[in-house]
Image: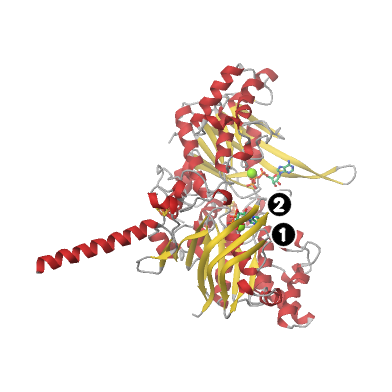
């Protein structure tokens, strides 16, 4: 595990990131409100570490991930890569930065052009960025295909001729072509069969070591996140609820939502089925109209008056939590 | 507990423009009243087709071509459409993964709920309505009196799945088939729905076929489990035996490949190499042959059958390893007896 050292500089800094999507209505498309997809998110990512992002559907994980590689323009806040603000760097510099920042998507199929052969798909980014001649690109393609465990002779095949797991390997190979420093993995294994997920997770872990990569790993499944992450950010309704090392999150969760989320996962051991389970009622409120105060108060079993009025800030040094009444060891 | 359902070696085929495809082949399992069986396996292994075969809800190009499906005293594999209409929604009901596709968007929740109730239970309109409200309350819908007049799109995914459960259970079926009822839902909502299903099952003694690919859900819900691979059941036993003492190489691989939150930090995941064969490229012998770490010569050419093995509990496996073991065991046993005889003589 790569613990961030105090003196080490973060590779990526996210500062008060907000992304609001306008809700339009009527013939003249009047803006009647905003979906607060990401609402004041901050964290640092250190070289060589994996930051996991977890939370339920719609909590803003993908929007955060896309903002980190500038596939979204933030409504407010900053994303600094190696100290440079992605919003203000020159076009030329941005082109260079784009090679350092890559993203892998959930659905390996829809993210690959079906009419292109795999060899061409992989060479494309190199040629587009004018980083290699055709011959060099070809050599590189062979190299990367070997790294991700795809036989070279598959180069002439089209995406539909591959299985889901193989397609995700292609997605990973494509992201690796430009030798990036940071890869955002947005649910890279969710669409895959269980027996294939392990292949891809192991591959990602091996590549991280051998190529010194930094990952942001977004997922629903806590097992996969735990397996791959050094630190974990727990999100709810566009906000960070808790951020700590993987061990802290699993062994000493401080936020009620984290505790409930961990608890909600069914355990693959029938001898545990009669454990007492903390099941919370109700649904996630709409991000167009999030609750006042603590956004979790409508479902939180510990909510008090202050929670309905005042939003808790994210506080702490290494273990950050946004709650007026964090769970402490003695109490829990 | 009486036996309710016995699925015996069914084969389901689809006619396609590229010729017939066998999706389910020699699938067998049985179920007693009040019992829950989980069908577990990867995408495309035939879980849904198995349940649709039982319900006679296959696409028009599909049919059960071999085997029998005994439900109480009827063979559903050979039942007429008229007989099936009487059974569906009454004795057997079904819920699907995506409740929105199975709820009619232009009818209110109440219209859809009361239709089945009036049809199968002979209630008047008013009686059906108050019974429907009672059912909605039972599945934990807040403001049931108001929700009953809403349209499905007004409800969240978890609420819709509750409505589906209310609808499926309203005629007190003997058997409920739930095809991935929580897969599309968030974990906190999944936990609510599983809790609800357990409670209703315990109250009404309904037997359940629960389809899932999540071994966590299996561990929470099942009495027994059928593990499917490429259209066949490869292992069947009670849930405790399956988790404590899995035997089939596929089941073993599956168990070890799941990253779980209780795993130690640095444990490496075991992965099963390769991928599931397609229906058109089915291996001739054992279907797991290409991916099996224990494959033997005979596995390439011969088809293993699902056979009971010696275990403390009923436990069936489709794999030559255990036949070999048995044979070995018998051989060794015979040798030993022979040796003993020689010594004593
Ligand atoms: N382009 C868009 N326009 C409008 N709203 C959007 C857009 N993209 C996302 N949203 C909304 O923003 C919120 C956050 O979405 P996001 O995709 O980031 O969630 P997520 O955490 O990745 O969810 P999931 O786990 O389902 O992938 C959701 O309410 C979503 O509907
Ligand atoms: N109408 C059809 N025509 C042809 N093939 C079909 C048809 N319906 C299903 N199949 C095939 O039958 C096989 C089994 O499908 P089934 O839907 O039962 O899988 P499953 O185990 O439920 O998978 P999943 O976990 O993805 O839901 C698949 O290969 C599928 O392509
Ligand atoms: S601030 Fe209050 S409502 Fe929010 S999580 Fe903490 S205790 Fe619950
Ligand atoms: S029959 Fe042979 S190939 Fe099939 S699972 Fe058993 S050992 Fe493996
Ligand atoms: Mg997403
Ligand atoms: Mg299915």
* Secondary structure category for the residue under label 1: helix
Rendering quadrant holding ligand 6: bottom right
Q: Which residue is mark 2?
A: A286
Task: Give the image location of residue B159, x and y in percent.
Answer: 68, 62
Query: Dot 2 falls on which chain?
Result: A
Of badges 1 and 2, the one in the foreground is 1
Q: Nearer the viewer, residue A243 or A231?
A: A231
Q: Residue furthest right?
A: A27
Q: Residue furthest top?
A: A133
Is A282 above or below relative to A186? below
Task: Give the image location of residue A117, x and y in percent.
Answer: 63, 31
Q: Is mark 1 within 8 Å of ligand 1?
A: no
Answer few, some or many: residues within 10 Å of disc 2's Cα (few below 14, many 20 plus, some between 14 and 19).
some
Q: Nearer the viewer, residue B32 or A232?
A: B32
Q: Nearer the viewer, residue B244 or B285?
A: B285
Q: Residue at 58% of width from left, 30% of height from top?
A: A155
Tell whether B324 sits left or right of B256: left
Q: Which residue is mark 1?
A: B100
In this orientation, does residue B320 appear? yes
The image quadrant of residue A21 is: top right
Task: Give the image location of residue B87, x and y in percent.
Answer: 66, 76
How far apart marks 1 and 2 lie (CA) works out to 19 Å
The image quadrant of residue B208 is: bottom right
Q: Is mark 2 within 8 Å of ligand 1?
A: yes
């Amino acid at each position: 595990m790569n613990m961030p050292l105090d003196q080490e500089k973060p590779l990526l800094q996210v500062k008060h990131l907000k992304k609001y999507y306008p809700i339009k209505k009527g013939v003249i498309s009047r803006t009647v409100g905003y979906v607060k997809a990401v609402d004041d998110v901050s964290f640092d990512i250190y070289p060589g570490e994996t930051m996991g992002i977890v939370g339920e559907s719609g909590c803003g994980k993908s929007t955060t991930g896309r903002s980190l590689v500038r596939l979204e323009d933030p409504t407010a806040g900053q994303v600094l890569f190696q100290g440079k603000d992605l919003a203000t760097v020159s076009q030329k510099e941005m082109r260079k930065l784009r090679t350092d920042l890559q993203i892998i998507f959930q659905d390996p199929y829809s993210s690959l052009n079906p009419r292109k052969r795999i060899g061409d798909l992989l060479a494309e980014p190199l040629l587009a960025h004018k980083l290699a001649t055709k011959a060099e690109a070809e050599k590189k393609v062979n190299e990367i295909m070997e790294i991700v465990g795809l036989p070279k002779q598959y180069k002439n095949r089209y995406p539909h001729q591959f299985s889901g797991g193989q397609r995700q390997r292609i997605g990973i190979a494509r992201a690796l072509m430009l030798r990036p420093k940071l890869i955002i993995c947005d649910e890279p294994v969710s669409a895959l069969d269980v027996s294939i997920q392990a292949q891809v997770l192991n591959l990602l872990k091996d590549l991280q070591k051998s190529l010194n990569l930094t990952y942001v790993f977004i997922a629903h499944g806590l097992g996969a996140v735990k397996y791959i992450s050094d630190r974990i950010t727990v999100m709810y309704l566009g906000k960070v609820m808790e951020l700590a090392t993987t061990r802290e999150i699993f062994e000493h969760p401080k936020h009620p939502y984290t505790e409930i989320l961990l608890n909600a996962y069914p355990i693959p051991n029938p001898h545990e089925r009669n454990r007492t389970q903390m099941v919370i009622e109700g649904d996630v409120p709409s991000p167009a109209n999030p609750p006042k105060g603590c956004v979790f108060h409508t479902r939180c079993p510990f909510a008090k008056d202050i929670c309905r009025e005042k939003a808790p800030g994210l506080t702490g040094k290494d273990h950050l939590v946004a709650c007026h009444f964090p769970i402490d060891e003695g109490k829990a | 507990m009486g036996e309710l359902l016995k699925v015996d070696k069914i084969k389901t085929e689809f006619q396609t423009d590229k010729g017939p495809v066998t999706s389910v082949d020699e699938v067998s399992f049985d179920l007693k009243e009040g019992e829950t069986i989980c069908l577990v396996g990867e995408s495309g292994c035939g879980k849904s087709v198995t349940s649709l075969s039982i319900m006679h809800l296959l696409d028009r190009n599909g049919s059960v071509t071999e085997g029998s499906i005994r439900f109480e005293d009827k063979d559903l594999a050979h039942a007429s459409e008229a007989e099936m209409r009487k059974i569906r929604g009454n004795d057997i009901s079904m819920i699907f993964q995506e409740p929105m596709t199975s709820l009619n968007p232009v009818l209110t929740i109440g219209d859809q709920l009361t239709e089945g109730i009036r049809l199968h239970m002979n209630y008047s309109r008013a009686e059906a309505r108050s019974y429907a409200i009672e059912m909605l309350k039972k599945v934990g819908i807040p403001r049931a009196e108001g929700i009953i007049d809403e349209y499905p799109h007004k409800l969240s995914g978890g609420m819709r799945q509750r409505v589906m459960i209310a609808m499926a259970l309203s005629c007190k079926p003997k058997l409920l088939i739930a095809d991935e009822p929580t897969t599309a839902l968030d974990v906190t909502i999944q936990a609510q729905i599983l809790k609800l299903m357990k409670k209703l099952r315990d109250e009404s003694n309904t037997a359940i076929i629960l389809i899932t690919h999540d071994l966590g859900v299996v561990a929470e819900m099942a009495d027994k489990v059928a593990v499917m691979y490429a259209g066949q059941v490869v292992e069947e036993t009670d849930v405790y035996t399956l988790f404590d003492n899995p035997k089939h190489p596929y089941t073993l691989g599956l168990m070890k490949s799941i990253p779980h939150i209780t795993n130690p930090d640095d444990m490496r995941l075991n992965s099963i190499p390769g991928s599931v064969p397609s229906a058109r490229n089915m291996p001739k012998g054992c279907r797991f042959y290409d991916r099996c770490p224990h494959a033997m010569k005979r596995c390439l050419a011969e088809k293993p059958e699902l056979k009971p093995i010696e275990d403390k509990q009923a436990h069936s496996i489709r794999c030559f390893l255990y036949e070999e073991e048995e044979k070995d065991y018998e051989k060794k046993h015979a040798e030993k007896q022979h040796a003993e005889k020689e010594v004593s003589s």
